[in-house]
Image (tube, helix red, strand yellow):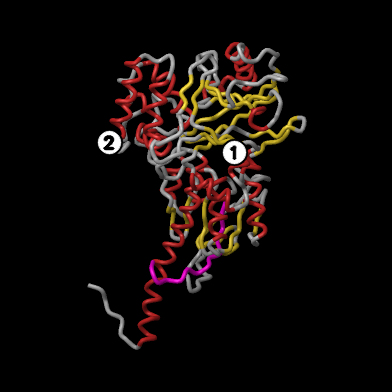
Amino acid sequence: MPGLTRRPMHLAVIGAGWAGLAAAVEATARGHRVMLAEMAPAAGGRARRAGTDGGLPLDNGQHILIGAYTETLRLMRQVGVEPRDALLRMPLTLAFADGGVLALPAGRPATAFARAVLARRGWRWRERLALLLAASGWARGGFGCDPGLSVAQLTAALPARIRAELIDPLCIAALNTPAATASASVFLRVLRDALFSGPGSADLLLPRVDLSALWPDAALAWLEARGADIRLARRVARIEPDLQGTNQRGAGWRVDGERFDAVVLASSSVEAARLARPVAPAWAERAAALRHEPIATVVLRARGARLSHPLLALRESAAEPAQFVLDLGRLRGIDGVFAFVISGASAWTARGSEATARAVLEQARRALAGQVHTAFERVRIFTEKRATFLCMPDLQRPAQPVARRLVAAGDYVAGPYPATLEGAVRSGVGAIDALENEAASSEAPAQRRANGAASGSPMKTPC
């Protein structure tokens, strides 16, 4: 509110994934005092370094950023990470291992997209024209649609080749939900921000470092240097309203008995539901009702091998699970190490890690035979069982406000983005905005009363 002085708050942020770290960094930068609690021994949540193999740092999954991730890039710079060093920036390129490349040239995104489609080899002219007409129709409609539509329904009129070689890979990469069951409205929002929101918005930003080094490590160091109270390997048992310790701000919250002015629930949806259930049962039930989809990553080594692109799309089938492969040699200088990504991996995780790893190994031998001429060796498989929520049509996600002075932050919280790093970061920043706006609203009447008393004028009741 204009004219009000923002008073520092003592905040508890529960969860040190990307959303919790974003909330803690933003709150600290605005002058608030922060306690950050994380049940795991390391920060980063579902995007972190998971360990090493022979000195090789390995992540618990693979994440790709795009140029439209403005809040993530801003907070990286704030804690001292230079995106130009930590990320390989390249024009959006969807290249398949067996040939065929859709690459956006430099320039205005809409024009670049049209040029890329027209230059795409292997597509017939009628297929290219159908895609351009559909995209222009989505743009004229403001990239909005019936929220009950799936991506498959939205794109049903497109040629099968366009759906198989563009729509399906983009959908599974962005939403971790197959096109048949994915929300068309969220998909269109991703397309709008990535392809049509400004120069460079569609650029791929591929990590040159492990995910912990990309941001969580620097964020923790930045917070520690500014006096934040960081408690790793600390699982919060309960939160409860503070019914005794009222002050100028009114009642706050107690986190395992310790008092705070406000709380940010930035843990997983399952953990947040557990903590919120005694104080906000309806919110907790909505959070607990979310369905999740796993992502599996199979890391293989082929010594001395190198791919034609740092990121390649693969043909998925009943026997070939991976949709993408990243060349960690080209990205991080790790010779001949490749990360094969299986999004929407529930069917494969049900078969077990051994069967999944064998299938990917065979897929790699067949799909990359023209580029890799040495034998593949299995390194490790990672499975993130609750990698993302299933982004289905008409999905009712839990709201950010939970109760008075209690807000949620996470990629699952209601918002325009699917479960992405940018969605998590924006939610964390939004949580601090929400708490400050609530505090300003509650302080406004007291400030008006104080101003009225100081001037000797009676307070007037507004019409």
**x%, y% of residue 357?**
63, 19
Residue 25 on the magenta segment: no
**x%, y% of residue 2?**
38, 68
The one of 384 and 79 positioned closer to us in this rendering: 79
Which amino acid lies under the numbered mark 1 shown in the image of this protein? Answer: Leu
**x%, y% of residue 66?**
50, 37
Q: Pointer 2: what residue?
A: 141
**x%, y% of residue 416?**
40, 42
At a point 52% along the width and 41% down the height, the residue shown is 421
Residue 384 tag number: none
Q: Pointer 1: what residue?
A: 87
At a point 57% along the width and 13% down the height, the residue shown is 367
Q: Residue placed farthest to the left in the image?
A: 463
Image: magenta residue range? 1-14
Residue 380 picture quarter: top right
Mark 2: secondary structure: loop
**Are there few (<14), some (14-19), or many (20+) residues within 10 Å of tag 1?**
many
* Precedes in sequence: disc 2 or disc 1: 1
At a point 42% along the width and 62% down the height, the residue shown is 438
